[in-house]
Image (cartoon, helix red, strand yellow):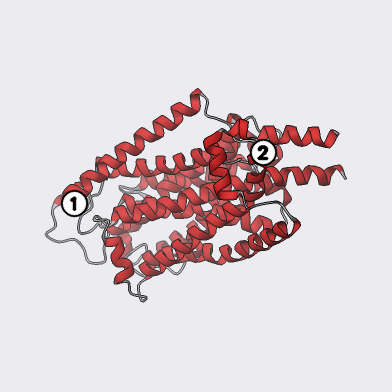
């Protein structure tokens, strides 16, 4: 009887909650930003890429920076769900659904922003009809598509036991949502055979997604490293991208943990212990990424080849120095200093650190793209003055902000539709503690 009461309390705590006033304002704000981005994209389709600030030299601008950022955040699904699950990390269970939702939202907009960067959307079709296997671009399309479907399945399979629970609470979910839950999960009866089959499928997906996740970031790095440019001519790029992706993905999970904990009153399920342990993960990943940054810049700095001199000077003391040092300090060094202290691994400081890591990571991706393109091996001759500089047009900013808002909107809606913390797993853990 006591167990039944506890189970009912846990289920009521973790059921999806309807938007309050603040939630509705948040959704409305994100929708407005998305609509502004859609209007800017309409202008880009109508008038062409001339509405952007991209030209012959900076042919990859803020769109590709945003693409790399989304791809990086999507890695969190394989980190929290796959690696933690396979390593038997039990404390990570309440965070798996958050990580899976972030991964799905990020990989969706990573794909969309590539289509935006192409100019005319029908060009995406040409990748499949005229794609060449010799090109890293077609490899990127293949691994992103594969990663998206694996991430979607990793979100869906663990949801099935929770959907069975949601179907029992029709009065709380409403007729429309009840029909939706029935459509996607009414076949789940919760038999031992189904649980065994589901567990096997999830383990296979976890094993599969790790090499795919490493591949997606390695191939993305090859898009740069196989392009003969100062700053990209590096064999370090694969590991450099993966380390950065693990860091920003963990930062995104920390921010989501704090927001959902506050908004849905989940203090009993996302505890200070979770922030403590995630703080240790983040500081380890920050140190690792800082090492790869030092390796990435110190090696060419000591050699100081003439072709890379302008690029390095621009980063360390030139036009991009403010952004560069901002990204290094805010995205890595200050978070490391904060997280080395136990008080820095409390929920609020961790939230601030998570925001710093995400913001620093976005600017870091901007720095990977733009300074290199402005410093080609062959110096610019007889080029208009505007070609020597790049600052995104309002259309580029609007589309970029719209894509970021779109990813947040997907996360918000999925958190409204599905339990943000796995209910069945939480019940099972409580039963195991009681034995």
CB-based contact (under 8 Å), mark 1 and mark 2: no
User: CA–CA distance between discs 1 and 2?
Assistant: 52 Å
Q: Position of residue 218 (x, y in %)?
A: 47, 65
Residue where numbered disc 1 is placed: 48
Q: Position of residue 320 (x, y in %)?
A: 33, 48
Q: Is residue 204 above or below residue 53?
A: below
Q: Position of residue 313 (x, y in %)?
A: 33, 54
User: Which label is found at residue 235?
Assistant: none
* Residue found at the far bottom of this picture: 134
Q: Residue at x 24, y 55 (%)?
A: 119
Q: Position of residue 273 (x, y in %)?
A: 71, 40
Say which quarter of the image contains residue 6.
top right
Residue where numbered disc 2 is placed: 168
Say which quarter of the image contains residue 269.
top right
Q: Estimate how packed mark 1 is, as few (under 14), some (14 to 19) or many (20 or more) residues with alpha carbons within 10 Å.
A: few
**Mark 1: secondary structure:** loop
Q: Residue at x 64, y 43 (%)?
A: 340
Q: Residue at x 28, y 45 (%)?
A: 396
- Count of picture labels: 2
Comparing marks 1 and 2, which lies closer to the viewer? Answer: 2
First in sequence: mark 1 vs mark 2 = 1
Check the picture and name the quadrant holding the C terminus.
top right
Regarding residue 34, the answer to whether it shows in the image is yes
């Amino acid at each position: 009887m006591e167990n039944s009461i506890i189970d009912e309390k846990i289920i009521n705590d973790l059921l999806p909650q309807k938007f309050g006033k603040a939630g509705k304002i948040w959704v409305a704000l994100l929708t407005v930003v998305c609509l502004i981005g859609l209007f800017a994209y309409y202008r880009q389709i109508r008038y062409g890429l001339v509405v952007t600030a991209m030209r012959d030299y900076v042919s990859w601008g803020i769109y590709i920076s945003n693409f790399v950022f989304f791809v990086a955040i999507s890695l969190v699904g394989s980190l929290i769900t796959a690696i933690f699950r396979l390593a038997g990390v039990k404390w990570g269970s309440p965070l798996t659904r958050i990580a899976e939702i972030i991964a799905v939202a990020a990989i969706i907009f990573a794909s969309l922003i590539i289509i935006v960067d192409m100019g005319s959307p029908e060009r995406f079709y040409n990748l499949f009809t005229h794609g060449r296997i010799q090109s890293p671009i077609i490899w990127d399309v293949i691994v992103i598509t594969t990663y998206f479907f694996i991430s979607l399945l990793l979100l869906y399979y663990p949801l099935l036991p929770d959907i069975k629970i949601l179907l029992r609470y029709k009065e709380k979910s409403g007729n429309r949502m009840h029909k939706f839950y029935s459509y996607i999960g009414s076949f789940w009866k919760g038999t031992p055979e189904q649980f065994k089959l589901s567990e096997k499928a999830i383990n296979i997906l976890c094993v599969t997604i790790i090499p795919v996740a490493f591949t997606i970031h390695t191939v993305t790095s090859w898009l740069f490293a196989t392009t003969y440019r100062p700053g990209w001519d590096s064999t370090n790029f694969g590991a450099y991208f993966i380390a950065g992706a693990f860091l920003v993905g963990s930062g995104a999970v920390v921010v989501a943990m704090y927001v959902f904990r506050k908004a849905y009153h989940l203090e009993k399920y996302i505890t200070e212990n979770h922030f403590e342990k995630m703080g240790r993960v983040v500081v380890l990943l920050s140190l690792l990424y800082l090492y790869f940054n030092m390796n990435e810049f110190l090696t060419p700095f000591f050699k100081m080849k003439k072709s890379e001199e302008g690029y390095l000077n621009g980063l360390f003391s030139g036009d991009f120095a403010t952004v560069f040092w901002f990204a290094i300090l805010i995205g890595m060094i200050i978070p490391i200093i904060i997280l080395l202290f136990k008080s820095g691994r409390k929920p609020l400081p961790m939230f601030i650190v998570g925001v710093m890591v995400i913001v620093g990571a976005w600017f870091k991706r901007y720095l990977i793209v733009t300074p290199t393109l402005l410093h080609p091996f062959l110096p610019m001759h007889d080029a208009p003055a505007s070609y020597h500089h790049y600052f995104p047009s309002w259309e580029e900013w609007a589309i970029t902000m719209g894509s970021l808002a779109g990813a947040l909107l997907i996360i918000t809606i999925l958190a409204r539709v599905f339990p943000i913390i796995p209910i069945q797993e939480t019940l099972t853990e409580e039963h195991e503690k009681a034995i």
